[in-house]
Image (cartoon, rainbow, N blue to C red):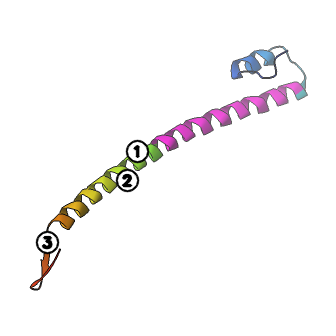
């Protein structure tokens, strides 16, 4: 006997069960499958967005480091005072 069913297996089982309680339980199980499927698709989208944000942050950090290195190599003059 399996310990878990797929959504299709639960749907097939509903064809065999005729009591009101069995039908109600089956409906609730199917709703749970739908909720899990929706959560997983939402999670995948969120994960993709987070990965894109991390990539953007990494690119900004690299640019900032390049800018900082450039400015540290050149003397900086302001109001007649030069800073190295």
Label pair 3/1, CB-CB below 8 angstroms: no
Is 2 rendered above or below residue 60? above
Q: Which mark is residue 14?
A: none
Residue position for label 3 = 75
Which residue is labeled 2 in the image?
57
Badge 1: few (under 14), some or many (20 or more) residues near its Cα, within 10 Å? few
Q: For mark 1, what is the residue?
A: 52
Which residue shows up at 71% across the image and 21% down it? 6
- The crowding category of the residue bearing disc 3, from other C-alpha atoms within 10 Å (few below 14, some 14 to 19, many at least 20), is few
The residue drawn where x is 17% and y is 74% is 84
Distance in Å between CA atoms under marks 3 and 1 = 36 Å
Which mark is nearer the camera, 3 or 2? 3
From mark 3 to mark 2, how far is it between C-alphas? Answer: 28 Å
Give yes or no for residue 31 being in the magenta stretch.
yes
Camera-side residue of 22 and 57: 57
Q: CA distance from mark 1 to mark 2?
A: 9 Å
Query: Where does residue 45 sit, x and y in percent of width and height?
Result: 50, 40
């Amino acid at each position: 006997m399996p310990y878990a069913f797929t959504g299709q297996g639960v749907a097939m089982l509903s064809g065999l069960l005729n009591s009101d309680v069995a039908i109600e339980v089956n409906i609730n199980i199917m709703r749970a499958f739908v909720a899990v499927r929706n959560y997983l698709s939402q999670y995948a989208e969120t994960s993709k967005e987070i990965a894109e944000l991390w990539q953007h942050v990494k690119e900004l950090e690299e640019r900032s480091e390049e800018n900082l290195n450039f400015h540290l190599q050149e003397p900086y003059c302001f109001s007649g005072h030069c800073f190295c």
